[in-house]
Image (cartoon, helix red, strand yellow):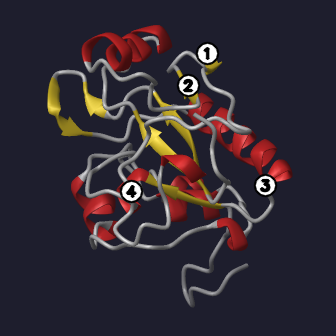
Amino acid sequence: MKRTNTAAIVIHTTASNTGNTVQQIQDYFLRILRWNKGGYHIMYQQNGTRREWYNWRDEATNGILPSPTGDLHNGNTIHLSYIGGINNLNQNEAVCNITPTQETLIIEDIKRILTWYPKVKILGHNQINQKACPSFWVPDWLRAHDIPEINIDDRDPFNLKNWVKTAIPHPANFYASRTKKQVCPTCGKEL
C-alpha cells in the first residue's frame, strides 16, 4: 500500500525483549498477528544494527491506529522503532532502555527524512494512541537533539506527558543528560 502523503514521523518501541532481532519482530507481525505488513519502516537493534524494512519514501505500514482527530494514520506516517521498551524480566512493565547507539541512528534517520520532507512533524506513538510506546516523551527528546521546533509535535491528547516522564523507569537523568544547554545553578538563566 502506498502512503497518500507524509504528515509525520512516529517514534516507537517494539515493546519486546532487548535481545530480539529485527527478523523476530517482523515474524511476530506477519506470522503471529497475521498482518499483511509489519508496523515499522525502520527498526534499530540494541547492538546498533539498523534495518530498513519498508520504503519510508512512499510505502505505508501498520504502525498506528488513526489519531483521535483523524489527522494521522498509516497512510500519512513514517514509523521508526527501537527494539526494547519493556523490562526483560517483566513484560508488563514499560521501561526506557533505548541505547545511545539506537538514539544516534534514529536521530540520523530523522535528519535524513527531514531533507525529503522538511515540514513533517515528529512525535511519539503515545501522542497518537493511549499507550506507553516509545517509553519516553519524544518532544523533549527531540529538543535535546536539536531537531527544529517547526518539526516537533507537542500534542498530548491523553495527558500522558507527565506520566511517561515519571511513571516509566528511565536510566538515571534520561532527559537531563540529553540537554545540551547549561544553566546557572543560582539564577536558572541559560549560560
Percent of width and height locating residue 59 = 64, 35
Q: Is residue 15 left or right of residue 57?
A: left
| Mark 4: secondary structure | loop
Q: Which residue is mark 2?
A: 44
According to the image, label 1 marks what residue? 49
Crowding around mark 4 (Cα neighbors within 10 Å: few <14, some 14 to 19, many 20+) is some
Pointer 2 local density, CA inside 10 Å: few below 14, some 14–19, many at least 20 = many
Amino acid marked by disc 4: Pro
Residue at left 39%, top 62%?
67
- Give the mark nearest the N terminus, 3 or 1: 1
Pointer 3 residue: 117
Is the residue under label 2 in contact with that under label 3 (CB below 8 Å)?
A: no
Q: Is residue 3 positioned above or below 24 on the image?
A: below
Q: Quadrant of residue 146?
A: bottom right
CA separation in Å, label 2 and label 1 = 6 Å
The residue depicted at 57 percent of the width and 38 percent of the height is 60
Q: Quadrant of residue 171?
A: top left
Instruction: State how far apart marks 3 and 1 are (Cα).
Output: 25 Å
Query: Mark 4 sits on what residue?
Result: 66
Q: Position of residue 166 (x, y in %)?
A: 27, 61
Q: Is disc 1 in contact with disc 4, using a CB cutoff of under 8 Å? A: no
Q: Are marks 2 and 1 in contact (CB under 8 Å)?
A: yes
Separation of marks 4 and 2 at Cα, in angstroms: 24 Å
Mark 3 → mark 2, Cα distance in angstroms: 21 Å
Q: Along the polypeptide, which appears first: circle 3 or circle 2?
A: 2
